[in-house]
């Protein structure tokens, strides 16, 4: 039970954090050009966005859950299980961020999820 | 469309930068921490490890690359879909396995090779789709 809870925190924290950061970055807008000065201005705008700072603690929570989980379960279970975040993240992208996830993209995500689980299991 | 093509190339280059920075950063941190050795779980042990880490050039190299990862990740998410960038970033796992075989001469299990193939096919499938399906704030904001 506690393992499932920690795994849920790990996955929901990382995907929730990344979704919040994505939302913040979309509101920030693209850098005018990919030069150091324009990138610094871009980062300055991003750091003043509330969604960015919503994402950071969620990702910290996820990282803490990962550490706790690793103290209970072997890494060969933890990392493959956390590959589920590819599917959860795609659901979030579809239903929270309103991105269009085509059949081809879904197929790719499922293959990547299975692939990462296999690679991490060693 | 030329702008569609430009968006695709720009996104792929940035994802590649992201993956290379993440891998290089992790590798340098791991190398730096193994130079330092196992950290003793006491107050003085942590302090000693802290002093060793902040004076270790390899660790700073790792921090440099991980900062590069964060900046490239934020940059690509400012124009591309999260559901495009996230699976594409998994290419790093495949790259890491190939590097382990080529440079470190590690042997890789059949299961892991199957995983690498699935990741590559999955990333190619996602790569075919449109990198951006939502509206983005105007570039003029700069």
Image (cartoon, grey):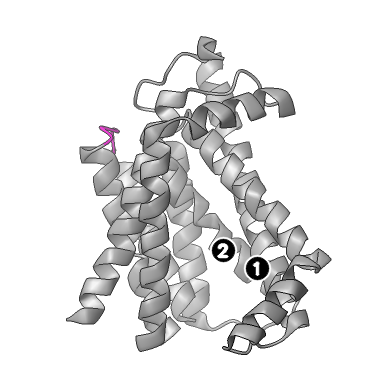
Seen in the picture, residue B111 relative to A99 is either above or below; the reply is below
Residue A100 inside the magenta-drawn segment: yes
Task: Find disc 1 in the rendering and name its residue.
Answer: B98
Task: Find disc 2 in the rendering and name its residue.
Answer: B94
Q: Are marks 1 and 2 on the same chain?
A: yes
Q: Which residues are magenta?
A: A97-101
Residue A80 spot, x, y in % from top left: 38, 73
Seen in the picture, residue B88 relative to B47 is either above or below; the reply is above
Check the residue under mark 2 and report the chain it is in.
B
Q: Residue at x 57, y 29 (%)?
A: A44
Seen in the picture, residue B100 relative to A95 is either above or below; the reply is below
Q: Residue at x 65, y 20 (%)?
A: A33
Q: Residue at x 60, y 52 (%)?
A: B19
Main SS class of the magenta portion in the image: loop
Q: Residues within 10 Å of mark 2 (few under 14, many from 20)?
A: many
**Element assignment for label 2:** helix
Q: Are marks 1 and 2 in contact (CB under 8 Å)?
A: yes
Check the residue under mark 1 and report the chain it is in.
B
Residue B136 spot, x, y in % from top left: 41, 21
Q: Residue at x 62, y 90 (%)?
A: B40
Q: Check the picture and name the quadrant holding the N terminus of chain A.
A: bottom left
């Amino acid at each position: 039970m506690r393992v499932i809870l920690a795994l849920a925190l790990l996955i929901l924290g990382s995907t929730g954090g990344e979704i919040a950061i994505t939302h913040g970055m979309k509101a920030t807008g693209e850098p005018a050009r990919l030069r150091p000065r324009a990138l610094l201005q871009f980062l300055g705008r991003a750091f003043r966005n509330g969604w960015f700072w919503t994402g950071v603690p969620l990702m910290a929570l996820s990282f803490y859950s990962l550490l706790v989980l690793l103290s209970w379960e072997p890494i060969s279970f933890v990392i493959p299980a956390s590959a589920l975040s590819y599917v959860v993240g795609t659901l979030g992208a579809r239903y929270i961020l309103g991105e269009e996830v085509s059949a081809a993209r879904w197929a790719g995500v499922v293959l990547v999820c299975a692939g990462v689980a296999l690679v991490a299991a060693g | 469309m030329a702008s569609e093509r430009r968006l695709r190339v720009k996104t792929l280059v940035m994802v590649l930068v992201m993956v290379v920075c993440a891998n290089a950063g992790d590798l340098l941190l791991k190398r730096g921490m193994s130079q330092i050795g196992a950290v003793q779980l006491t107050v003085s042990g942590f302090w000693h490890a802290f002093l060793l880490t902040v004076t270790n050039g390899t660790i700073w190299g790792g921090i440099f690359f991980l900062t590069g990862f964060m900046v490239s990740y934020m940059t690509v998410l400012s124009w591309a879909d999260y559901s495009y960038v996230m699976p594409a970033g998994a290419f790093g796992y495949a790259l890491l396995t190939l590097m382990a075989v080529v440079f470190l001469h590690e042997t890789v299990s059949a299961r892991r090779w199957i995983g690498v193939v699935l990741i590559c096919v999955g990333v190619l499938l996602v790569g075919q789709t449109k990198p951006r399906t939502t509206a983005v704030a105007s570039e003029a904001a700069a």
